[in-house]
Structures are given as C-alpha cells and as structure tokens.
Image (cartoon, helix red, strand yellow):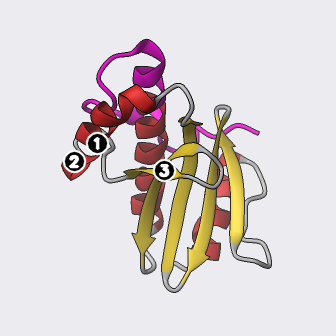
Amino acid sequence: MTHQELLRKLGETAGIELELSDVATAAAKFDGDEVDFESDEGKLYIYANIAPVEGHEGDFGRLLESNNLFAGTDGATIGLDRERGMLTLCRAVEGEPEYDAFEHTVASFVTALRLVRRELAEGGEAGGEPPSDLGGMSGGHFLQV
C-alpha cells in the first residue's frame, strides 16, 4: 500500500480523516498524543515530541541507554531537535508495507512514546520493555480525535 493509502485506512479504521497534505505531511492524535507523519523518498517517517529539552538534561544518559539497540523504544529512535528545543521520537517505515504491519508499527510507536514520557516524568529508567499487548492498541481502537 502507498503511504497515502496506509494513512487513509488508519483514519478509516479510527473513524477520522487522515491523509497526507500537499507537502506530504499528516498529523493525528492517539488518545491525546499527537503523532506526525511525513512521506519522503520512499520512507514514511512517524515522529512525535517527547518533552522539552529544558529540565531533562540530566536524563540524557538514560535516554541514550533506552535508544541503544532500541532497548526501550521498540524500533524508534530518540533524538534532539535543537532548533525547537525538543526531545523527539522517530521511526521510519520503508517501502509500502501491508496495512496490518503498519498499524502494528504505529501502535508500538505510540506505546514507546508513552513509556518514555512516563519514565521521564517519574524519573525512572527511560523506555523499558514495551508491553507485548501494545496497551490494547489494535484494530484502530487507540485513535481519538
């Protein structure tokens, strides 16, 4: 499926309109967590803000541990957007995957985002093992407008 088709089907499953704009970007809220999508050169990037950098400088070591071999991010990458002063989470989907695999990737991304945010807020180890059930986020039931 093309990136546009994947996003449209994800939107249909969730009961919202979701498609790439003229500049190949889209955004959706997953139970209040905003996630952005961008299609570029055969890849669909999924990304979100984790938290402002300010106040989390002391967490960089834990974030790097979580980032190492995707130990606490389930395939996503933690990054630093210096221009906006934000810690970010990003994942690239290559090619044109089947819809079920794409939905699973989005669900696992949102779960990792929530885990990293929670651990930063609680001051514990960032990331950790993502739950195997993806927090019940399957079949499009995890997306709210």
Looking at the picture, tell me which residue is in the foreground, 1 or 40: 40
N-terminal of the pair, mark 3 or mark 2, is: 2
Tell me the number on the disc at residue 68: 2
> Most prominent secondary structure in the magenta stretch?
loop
Looking at the picture, tell me which residue is in the foreground, 75 or 142: 75
Q: Are marks 1 and 2 in contact (CB under 8 Å)?
A: yes
Q: CA distance from mark 1 to mark 2?
A: 6 Å
Residue position for label 3:
80
Residue 57, quarter of picture: top left
Q: Is residue 121 left or right of residue 123?
A: right
Identified by mark 2, the residue type is: Asn
Image point (61%, 62%), residue name:
37
Examine the structure image and report whether residue 143 is included in the region drawn in magenta: yes
Query: Which span of residues is magenta-colored?
Result: 117-145
Q: As drawn, which residue projects farthest toward the bottom?
A: 41
Examine the structure image and report whether residue 13 is included in the region drawn in magenta: no
Mark 1: which secondary structure?
helix
Tell me the number on the disc at residue 64: 1
Looking at the picture, tell me which residue is in the foreground, 78 or 5: 78
Identified by mark 3, the residue type is: Leu
